[in-house]
Structures are given as C-alpha cells and as structure tokens.
Image (tube, grey):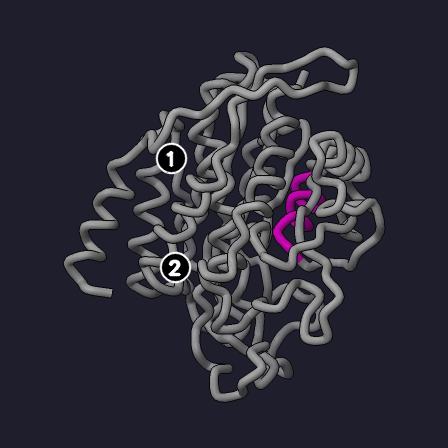
C-alpha cells in the first residue's frame, strides 16, 4: 500500500467515532414483547477489520502490534468508554519475553450488573497450517483470527449508549493468545497447552485479585469466516452451559439457526478457559467448528489467506446481532 494512503486511512480510522447512525430494529423477546434495538452494522465491523489489518500482522513486540494497540485504545475512548491498559512482560514457550498489552474498555463502569465481552487482538507469528510449506514461517494477517472478534467488540462499543441504563459492559481485548509453539518446536512447549492464551490467563489472575465480578462472559474468536459454522464448544458446555443455551436460542430466534446449529462441536484451548477456571465467571466461546481436513476452525486458520478478502459480512452480522440482542434484553 502507498505509504501516504496508509497514513491517511489510519488517521481517518483514529478520528472517526461515528461512521454512521445505526438504524433501529424491533425484535421479539422470549416473552413475546418487543425491544427496539440499534442495528449492528456489518459494514462498520468490516471496516474495523480492514483498519487492524492495515497495520500489518499484530505480532507482540512488533511495530504493527504497538500501532494497532494505540488504535484500539483510541477507538474505545472515542466511543466514550473508560479504558485501562494492562501492560506486562510474559515469557513465551521458547523463553522470548513478550510485551503484552491487554486492553479493557468499560461501558458504564459504575454499574454493579456487568457483562464481559472479549476477543484476542494479537495474530499468529507463523502460518504453520498453510497448505504451502514455504509459507509456514510467514506471519498471519489475522483478519478472522483476531481482527473479526475485536471488530464486533468495537461495533458493539459504538452502540453501547443504547444498552440498558443499569448495565455495565467490559470489552476486553486479550493479547498473546496465538503464541503457541509451531509444529517444528512443539517438543519445547509445555504439554498442558499453557503456551497459548498467555494474556487472558494473566488478566484473569489479576482480575481475581481485584475482585472483578460479571454475570457471564462471551468470547468471540474467528467470527467472520466465509465458511463459519458455530457449534457448541466443549469447555463452554461444561463450564457455561446456560450461556451457551442463551446464545444459540437467541441466534435461532433472530433467524441465524443455520449458522448456529444446535449440536456439539470440538474443544478449543481458548481465552474463555482462563475466565472460567481462574476467575470463576461462566464464559462461552463463539468459535467455528467446520468439517475441513486441514482444520476444524476453517480454511484460512493459520494460513496466509486469513485476509479481509475472506471475511463474510453476513457472518459478522449474525454474530453481532445475536450478542447485541442478548445485551439489549439483559435484566
């Protein structure tokens, strides 16, 4: 991309808080009453994906990572949220010290009734699932695996003024989720999967010390794929079954049953595990489970093809509308 054009686009993304006025849509609730909810804009969410990808791969310790972190902080502040940055140094499986930056943006921070929404914002340093072995040591752009979940959070944050007045929402962008050992160095990695999800485990441990409470949480991971299929995730069923039931029933009620089939999927070592097991907050993971010989997470997972060109606005809309409706109806 032309450098001048890149800086212009970045400046526009940083300064534009309200890209468009949301429409209002009346949707049914479980008791057949109606709630007028602001429309989730898939176009807006897609623009947030492009903005993140314009920085490059957001690998910890890189310039792109630092610049995109600044962008996310400013966007959340732009929407009137209170932002807290949690910066620390964490050791990767190979001993590399990572500059980790968890970002928490709180809507209505004084409210005692709180919901946790989260996603990871870092990207994989290696495209080690790419069909071409020559690409395995290239970084992943992470349009879906990272940017899509964050984009849905940003769009929901933009709509947060329309949430119930007594509801607080904490939008958390976890760092260093995707730093798990590549296949060529798996022998050096811990056998319990703790080489993954470094940021969320640190965040959950610190939040527990501070007495953080939320009624429940929803994790968004890879929520924009063209081949997405969101089945029940195993840890979510075991640790947050009522939240899973609510998400999938709401999706069905809104007409997204095909994308959210009510059947079992796989088990994902993901950021929600720390929220559940360390912090004790039931947190469900919306993550794809697809029938693909290379990966159950979708055809672009950990490949160089994880770009905005392979993002579906329809998928973004279905996920965003579902989560938004849950927030609007929260009592």
Disc 1 target residue: 76
Kind of element beneath mark 1 = helix
Coordinates of residue 315 in the picture (x, y in percent): 59, 47
Instruction: Residue at 79% x, 43% y: name it.
Output: 239
Q: Which residue is mark 2?
A: 99
Count all numbered tags in the image, as a single digit.
Answer: 2
Q: Are marks 2 and 1 in contact (CB under 8 Å)?
A: no
* Residue lying at 54% horizontally and 87% vertically, measured from the top left: 133
Rendering quarter of residue 1: bottom left
* Residue 273 magenta: yes
**Which residue appears at 40% of the width and 46% of the height?**
48
- Residue 262, by quadrant, is top right
Disc 2/disc 1 C-alpha distance (Å): 21 Å
Q: Residues within 10 Å of mark 1 (few under 14, many from 20)?
A: many
Name the residue furthest left. Answer: 4
Q: Which label's residue is closer to the chain start, 2 or 1?
A: 1
Q: Which one is in front, 330 or 155?
A: 155
Residue 253 drawn at (x, y percent): 75, 30
Q: Nearer the viewer, residue 227 or 189?
A: 227
Q: Which one is in front, 323 or 271? A: 323
- SS label for mark 2: strand
Seen in the picture, residue 20 relative to 311 is either above or below; the reply is: above
Q: Nearer the viewer, mark 2 or mark 1?
A: 1
From this view, report whether residue 163 is shown above or below residue 225: above
Magenta segment, which residues?
270-280
The dominant secondary structure in magenta is: helix
Which residue is at a point 42% across and 67% down the rendered structure image?
A: 97
Q: Position of residue 206 (x, y in %)?
A: 54, 42
Is residue 111 inside the magenta stretch? no
């Amino acid at each position: 991309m032309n450098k001048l054009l890149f800086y212009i686009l970045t400046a526009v993304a940083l300064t534009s808080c309200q890209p468009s006025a949301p429409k209002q849509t009346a949707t049914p609730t479980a008791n057949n009453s109606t709630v007028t909810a602001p429309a989730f804009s898939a176009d807006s969410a897609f623009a947030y994906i492009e903005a993140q990808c314009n920085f490059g791969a957001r690998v910890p310790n890189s310039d792109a990572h630092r610049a995109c972190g600044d962008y996310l902080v400013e966007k959340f502040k732009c929407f009137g949220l209170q932002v807290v940055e949690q910066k620390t140094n964490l050791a990767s499986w190979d001993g590399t010290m990572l500059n980790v930056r968890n970002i928490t943006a709180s809507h209505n921070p004084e409210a005692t009734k709180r919901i946790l929404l989260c996603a990871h914002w870092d990207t994989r340093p290696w495209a080690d699932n790419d069909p071409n072995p020559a690409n395995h040591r290239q970084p992943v752009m992470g349009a879906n695996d990272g940017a899509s979940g964050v984009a849905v959070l940003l769009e929901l944050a933009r709509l947060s003024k329309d949430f119930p007045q007594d509801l607080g929402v904490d939008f958390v962008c976890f760092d260093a989720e995707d730093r798990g050992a590549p296949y060529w160095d798996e022998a050096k990695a811990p056998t319990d999967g703790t080489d993954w999800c470094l940021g969320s485990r640190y965040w959950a441990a610190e939040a527990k010390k501070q007495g953080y409470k939320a009624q429940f949480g929803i994790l968004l991971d890879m929520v924009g794929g063209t081949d997405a299929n969101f089945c029940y995730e195993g840890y979510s069923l075991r640790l947050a079954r009522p939240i899973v039931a609510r998400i999938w029933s709401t999706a069905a009620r809104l007409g997204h049953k095909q994308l959210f089939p009510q059947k079992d999927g796989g088990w994902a070592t993901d950021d929600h595990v720390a929220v559940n097991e360390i912090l004790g907050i039931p947190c469900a993971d919306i993550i794809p489970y697809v029938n693909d010989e290379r990966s159950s997470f979708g055809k672009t997972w950990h490949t160089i093809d994880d770009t905005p060109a392979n993002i579906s606005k329809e998928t973004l809309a279905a996920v965003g509308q579902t989560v938004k409706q849950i927030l609007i109806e929260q009592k």
